[in-house]
Image: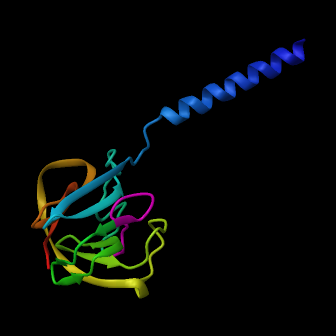
């Protein structure tokens, strides 16, 4: 009988712990930016990390190195139309977005490899790169955010806002 009660208690505790873990909000929750270009959808799916008191650019995200532009899995770009992103022509399709931040400008990377973990980057798969404009955020940005409109792609985090023009071709 003691054995039965002990086993039952352990099972209930395990189920309770598993349920509690499932309800926990992820540290870097999934997020999405979307816009329509001439009736065609363009979406960017990414994970949104938070500052949590850390130094981000020039610290957690080193200047001059390729960064996954988010957290967890690679940041995914899906476009149903050909785009012009800065100086880069992007045919309709699926891509991964990376960035190389510095204190004064960022480089946006559109990469043809898809579905990989965010830190798995291969320059050989780059479709191309384009320069982004950087400015100081007017107020601290706690959670990384990508936004997309019919004219600009914006990345905001910590004390930085990086933008690049975007339009349908």
Residue placed at 25% from the left, 54% from the top? 145
Q: Is residue 51 above or below residue 41?
A: above
* Mark count: 0
Q: Nearer the viewer, residue 89 or 13?
A: 89
Percent coordinates x, y for residue 20 in the rendering: 54, 29
The residue range painted magenta reads: 64-76
Percent coordinates x, y for residue 27 in the rendering: 42, 45
Residue placed at 18% from the left, 60% from the top? 35
Residue placed at 34% from the left, 62% from the top? 59
Residue 161 appears in the rendering:
no
> Picture quarter containing residue 85?
bottom left
> Picture quarter containing residue 33?
bottom left
Percent coordinates x, y for residue 116 in the rendering: 48, 68
Q: Is residue 165 magenta?
A: no
Q: Is residue 86 above or below residue 73?
A: below
Q: Is residue 17 above or below residue 128?
A: above
Of the 4 image quadrants, the one containing the N terminus is top right
Residue 65 appears in the rendering:
yes
């Amino acid at each position: 009988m003691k054995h039965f009660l002990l086993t039952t208690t352990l099972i209930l505790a395990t189920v309770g712990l598993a349920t509690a873990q499932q309800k926990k909000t992820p540290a870097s929750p999934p997020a999405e930016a979307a816009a329509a270009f001439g009736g065609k959808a363009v979406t960017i799916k990414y994970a949104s990390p938070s500052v949590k008191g850390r130094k981000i650019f020039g610290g957690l995200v080193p200047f001059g190195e390729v960064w996954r532009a988010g957290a967890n899995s690679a940041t995914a770009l899906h476009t149903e139309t050909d785009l012009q992103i800065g100086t880069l022509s992007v045919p309709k399709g699926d891509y991964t977005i990376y960035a190389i931040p510095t204190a004064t400008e960022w480089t946006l990377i559109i990469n043809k490899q898809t579905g990989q973990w965010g830190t798995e980057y291969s320059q050989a798969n780059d479709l191309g790169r384009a320069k982004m404009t950087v400015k100081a955020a007017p107020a601290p940005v706690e959670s990384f955010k990508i936004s997309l409109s019919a004219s600009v792609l914006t990345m905001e985090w910590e004390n930085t806002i990086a933008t690049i023009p975007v339009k349908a071709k």
